[in-house]
Image (cartoon, helix red, strand yellow):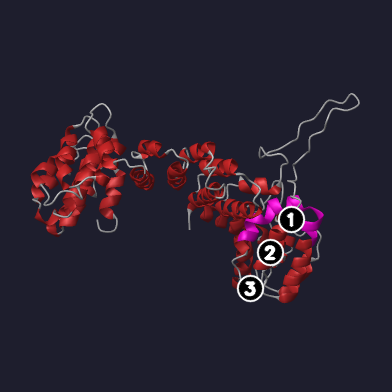
């Protein structure tokens, strides 16, 4: 359970305990739950307190009566017109058929009376309730409403008004940037990942967006799963354009600028079909291994040589940068190890670290004499990569030089790298290292020494 979910759960439990204890609800009193996890935790906590209390708490509040262990109490509470809709939605998945049926009538009535407000308030909760044995009914009800031919307007939406009879024109009011402002538009912008994914799937089923809009949504989306849904739909739309037209150049460029690697990889793949395979060379040094692999494929399909292009970059000291080194290492062979080894003297620490990482799968026996001094490199990433290179030979390392690097006068990253090697070496040296770092002034190193394996 993540920190956000723990916070939701605790807020729901605290509200339940307070109301059962007689606290006042509303302004100046107990704040009602406002998130899905808080509502479900509220429901569970009321039943838990009832099961452990004798006599049971009075439970005079409507909210607590809706969660009472006695089905007759829950059923009677559902007849109150002020019953909170989140708890009504929870009761739609109730284990008692009479309670469940009544709750479903109430929820269906609320949806018919005010679909915009009901959907925006309850979709996150209903998605979670859909996992329960009886939770599918409410989700199907909401699915039907959201798939309707006429979109459901958001409760805050206001249509534009033209100028007439001396009245000035009034623009449409929208909180999502879309006109008309619909519930689906709000769901697509939700901060809840489950809601965003759900909305993306429903939108793609409707087929309402063109290829450029699909590509734009894929590029700006930060959630990998949701961005993949948009990107795959954009690629399918490009393929459906027919063999003669080719992909939309603007859509391809949008995908290439995506936040998520999967989206950029789709853009690189589309370059070949767009007749722009030569541009794939620019993506051989992308920060993502997936994108670099797609770029190598596209370059080869166009008759190019990704190895030669990457080698040209790292041979020029003015043009070399970390991902150029990483990209070259992915298509290099053992004969290229000297070229990477020469980069260990590069002034940029990130380049030195990338060269070390590239050498690790290419070199044969570990050169301890060359790698050990790199633990003292001023760059933390270089020290980390050096430790990774030495890890397979940790049992053969002399403990004394490593223990000397645990002193407080050494940089924290050097102490961390030395400790990891000593811990991998095992024996008395590992025990001494744990004792030394247990008193280290750096709290993260103390936690490393005192944690599992320390």
Label 3 sits on a secondary structure element that is loop
Q: Residue lying farthest right? A: 165
Question: Is 10 one of the magenta-colored residues?
Answer: no
Task: Tell me the magenta residue range.
Answer: 109-127
| CA gap, disc 3 and disc 1 | 50 Å
Q: Extreme front residue here?
A: 244
Which residue is tagged 2? 140
Observer-side mark, 2 or 3, equals 2
Say if 214 sits above or below 73 in the image.
above
Label 2: element kind: helix
- What mark, if any, has residue 148 been given in the picture? 1
Name the residue rendered at 48%, 49% in the picture: 224
Disc number for residue 435? none
- Image depth: mark 3 or mark 1 in front: 1
Q: Earlier in the sequence, mark 2 or mark 3?
A: 3
Location of mark 3 (residue):
54
Percent x, y of residue 380: 25, 39
Measure the C-alpha gap from mark 2 to mark 3.
40 Å
Q: Main secondary structure of the magenta part?
A: helix
Q: Can you give x and y, in whole percent of width and height, for residue 247 in the image?
A: 52, 42
Q: CA distance from mark 2 to mark 1?
A: 12 Å
The residue sitting at 19% across, 35% down in the picture is 343
């Amino acid at each position: 359970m993540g920190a956000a979910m723990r916070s939701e759960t605790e807020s729901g439990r605290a509200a339940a305990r307070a109301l059962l204890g007689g606290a006042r609800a509303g302004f100046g009193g107990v704040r009602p739950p406002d998130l899905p996890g808080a509502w479900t935790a509220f429901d569970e906590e009321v039943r838990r307190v009832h099961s452990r209390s004798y006599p049971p708490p009075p439970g005079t509040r409507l909210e607590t009566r809706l969660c009472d262990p006695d089905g007759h109490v829950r059923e009677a509470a559902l007849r109150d017109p002020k019953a909170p809709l989140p708890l009504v939605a929870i009761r739609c998945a109730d284990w008692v058929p009479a309670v469940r049926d009544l709750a479903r009538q109430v929820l269906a009535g609320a949806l018919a009376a005010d679909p915009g407000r009901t959907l925006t308030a309850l979709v996150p909760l209903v998605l979670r309730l859909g996992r329960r044995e009886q939770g599918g009914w409410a989700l199907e009800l909401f699915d039907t409403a959201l798939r309707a031919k006429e979109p459901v307007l958001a409760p805050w939406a206001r249509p534009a008004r033209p100028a007439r009879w001396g009245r000035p024109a009034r623009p449409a009011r929208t909180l999502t940037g879309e006109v008309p402002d619909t519930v689906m538009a709000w769901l697509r912008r939700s901060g809840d990942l489950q809601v965003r994914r759900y909305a993306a799937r429903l939108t793609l089923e409707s087929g309402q967006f063109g290829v450029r809009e699909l590509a734009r949504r894929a590029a700006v989306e930060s959630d990998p799963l949701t961005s993949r849904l948009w990107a795959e739909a954009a690629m399918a739309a490009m393929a459906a354009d027919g063999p003669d037209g080719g992909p939309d150049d603007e859509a391809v460029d949008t995908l290439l600028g995506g936040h998520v690697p999967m989206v950029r990889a789709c853009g690189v793949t589309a370059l070949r079909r767009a007749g722009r395979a030569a541009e794939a060379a620019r993506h051989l040094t992308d920060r993502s291994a997936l994108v670099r692999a797609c770029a190598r494929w596209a370059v080869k399909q166009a008759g190019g040589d990704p190895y030669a292009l990457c080698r040209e970059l790292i041979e020029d000291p003015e043009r070399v940068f970390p991902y150029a080194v990483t990209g070259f290492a992915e298509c290099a062979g053992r004969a290229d190890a000297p070229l990477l080894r020469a980069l260990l003297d590069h002034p940029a620490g990130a380049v030195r670290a990338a060269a070390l990482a590239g050498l690790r799968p290419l070199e044969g026996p570990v050169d301890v004499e060359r790698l050990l001094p790199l633990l003292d490199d001023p760059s933390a990433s270089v020290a980390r990569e050096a430790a990774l290179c030495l890890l397979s030979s940790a049992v053969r390392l002399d403990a004394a030089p490593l223990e000397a690097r645990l002193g407080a006068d050494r940089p924290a990253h050097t102490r961390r790298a030395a400790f990891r090697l000593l811990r991998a070496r095992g024996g008395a040296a590992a025990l001494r290292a744990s004792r030394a770092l247990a008193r280290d002034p750096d709290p993260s190193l103390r936690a490393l020494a005192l944690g599992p394996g320390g």
